[in-house]
Image (cartoon, rainbow, N blue to C red):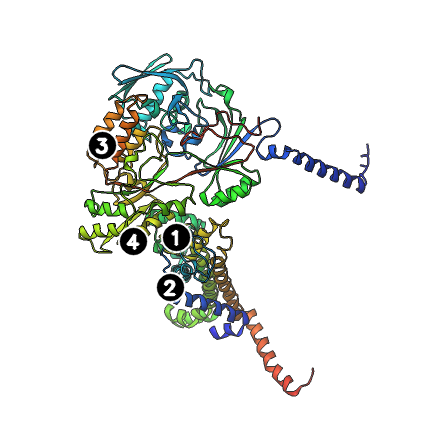
Amino acid sequence: MPALPRSRPPRRTLLAAALTATLATTTLAGCGFGDASAAGGGAGTSTLKWATSYFPKHWDPVVAGSGAQFRQLSLVYASLTRIDEKGEAVPDLAEKWTYNATGDEVTFHLRKGLTFSDGTPVDSTAIKAAIERAQKQENSALFGDLTSIRSVAANGLDVVVSLTQVDYQIPQLLGERVLQVASPKAAADPATLDQNPVGAGPFTITQLIPGTKAVLKKNPNYWDAANIHIDDVELTSAPDPTTVVSGLRTGVYNFADIAPAQADAAKKAGLDVFVQPGFNASNISLNVNKKPFDDPRVVDAVRHAVNRQEFVDKLTFGFGEVTDQPFPSGYVAYDPKSKDRYPYDPARAKALLAQAGYAPGAIKLDLVVPDGGPDAEIVQSQLGAVGITTTIKVDKNWATPFFAKDLTLSLYSTTGRDSALQTLTAHFGPNGPLNLSSPYEPAGFAKAVAAVRATPIDDPTYAETLQAATRAGLESRALVFTFEQPNILAKDKAISALPANPGHINWTGVTIGGK
Amino acid sequence: MVRRVLTLPSGRVAVGVLLAVGLLALVGPLLAPQDPLATTTDALARPSVQHWLGTDSLGRDVLSRLLDGSRVSVVGSLEVVVIALVVGVVPGILSVQLGRVFEWASLRIVDTLIALPFLLFAVAVTALLGNGITQAMVVTGVLVSPLFFRVSRAATLAVARSAYVEAAVISGASVTWVARRHLWSKVLPPIAVAFAQTLGVGFVIVSSLTFLGIGVQPPAPTWGGLLATSLGFLDQQPWAPIAPAALIVATVWASNLLADAIRDVTGEAGRDLLDRRTRRSATAPSLSRTGGTP
């Protein structure tokens, strides 16, 4: 049978069709339909397109640790507790918890009927396995955070945590940073879990391209699924920071963390730019076990040489804050009495060095850092101004000598911890990972820490006790805090405001395009 | 060869630009109007009388950093080329002269080097040996050396199998004598082309590595580093990448132009071209003198 000749539409018809299509698209876009598409909403679904500079290398929470990547992992994993806008522990998988009379045992009562996304029940056995894995797994980055836990007993939906000491910080500790709970079935093979995460969080992973992209969909079995209004998430490793704003503007992403230098461009592009509160704090780490910092006068000279405002102006474009403590001002652990104890005073710094017997330029040190960021150059410049010569050494293996406490001078930036006490012990404790001068500990710190542990968080004296511990910790000569790096985020206006939970990114109640 | 290169306009331009860049490397740091490392409160300032190219995010004078960084940028690329030349040319010639075992072994090594992605390898080696300009340049030089190996080997093969070399060998001439008398004159021109070409490649590599923060420790300035830094502040200073980028582009362009010029004056076609030009220039004055027309 011969093929029928196709009738070609006349050129005028084609032009008319094209014109109609263009007009229709323009009209629909003008009515706001285009916004929904750019924001990720289409065909009745709402999609979060998140470009992040902290795309997780590891999806096993035990290996990933409590650094900035926990925010991305919390898409998949839930925890016993979470943090509210005041920074206080509130129920998550556990609907409540109770301490015994002596404060050395806490029982978490789990919600009923919950399952991980692989169908495994969320019960006390799963929580016990998660805690013990974090304590014992060979490549665990969390074992140091769990030293207060002696043992865990599983009893149906009750998890009984026995402690090595009185410690009322445990509910804050076992939140999203330290105890994101993976399915015990999936965690039986930690290597597989690391790239195939299985949790009981608000989303489940449907596709993961390591280091590049993760696609997630809403978990209907999440305990608070009714308050999760996002259907899909596309989590992408952010390319060069300078291109993120273009991606946001063109709808490739609708949410991203951005560099301070890009904030202005993002605002001009009509995006919502906001600073999520957090516990970020940068410091200059000194090793008081090594010369010249074994002389307190040299440490004091460094303290007075630091012009914190310069960090804020040049690195955060005014979005950050100066800080001389590991907490932002206004936080419960921030000690107002310790504010500005060592003001910027280069003349005094020079005098202290002279008293210590060091002529200008006599102290020559390596400033060892993991990357050649401008913060190191500012430190070099400020120390140079008082007569301490530093050579910046970029060491890609910096973590090894830093955590082995082999360095004399370095820099560190923390994203903080949900437990204020954990932040203090990490920085000032004798074995604190961020204490470059281990086993050095400031006098009175251990006693102050013990007092905080023994004080229930709802006790009227808690804030005062905690601030006293901060004060004791700040006697440490091992750390000079400089500034707070802001968590600057930009989002499409179609995405509603996020809960201002300090240090966290929580999607509860967030809508896209009003859906 | 130099005189013949200078007879070509492209050769003169290339040599001029490269001499200017070389001069910048020699005296640039001395010409810097301000301390290139001194930070000020005047961050991200626009170009002004005081700061001709503005200031960077830490308030440092960009012109001073550009001038100060020229030495590392130029010397770095020269280091790459010289290391590649030494590591590549000697084994390239010897692979023809020293028999099959050496030939087989050297070819396999060269194949391996070619298979390695130089940028990634340089990053890996500096991570292992420490992030220094010497480590980065040595690694890069070795990885670029296969170009010289192949060029010198190809030229040597062509000469070594020629009748006059065989005659010299049969007459009892030593390998050294043959190399000095016959090889160098034939092998040198392609190596010179490769040298000029690799100078441009080396410059791009050094700029790329310093762009990635490899090889040079902060706060030392380099052209690649300045370019990388300026890209982070495009919103505030859209003009900032122009100066370092222009210097890099001009240097690479001049190197490639020089390679073309050397090729033109040393190859058979190039010699014909020069001959034609010489004949034309010899004829042109006589026409002019007589005022006649052909």
CA gap between label 1 and label 2 equals 23 Å
Marker count (numbered): 4
Q: Is residue A145 above or below residue B217?
A: above
User: Badge 2 local density, few (<14 within 10 Å), some, or many (20+)?
Assistant: many
CA gap between label 2 and label 4 equals 21 Å
Judge depth for marks 3 and 2 and give the one in front.
3
Q: Residue at x 38, y 32 (%)?
A: A64
CA gap between label 3 and label 1 equals 38 Å
Residue A504: image location, x then y, percent: 42, 30
- The residue carrying mark 3 is A445
Numbered mark located on residue A360 in the image? none
Q: Secondary structure at mark 2?
A: helix
**Are labels 1 and 2 on one chain?**
yes
Comes first in the chain, label 1 or label 2 = 2
Left or right placement of residue A57 versus residue A5 in this view:
left
CA gap between label 3 and label 4 equals 32 Å
* Nearer to the camera, A433 or B194: A433
The residue type indicated by label 2 comes to Pro
User: Badge 3 local density, few (<14 within 10 Å), some, or many (20+)?
Assistant: many
The answer to which image quadrant residue A396 occupies is: top left
Say whether marks 1 and 4 touch (CB < 8 Å): no
Judge depth for marks 1 and 4 and give the one in front.
1
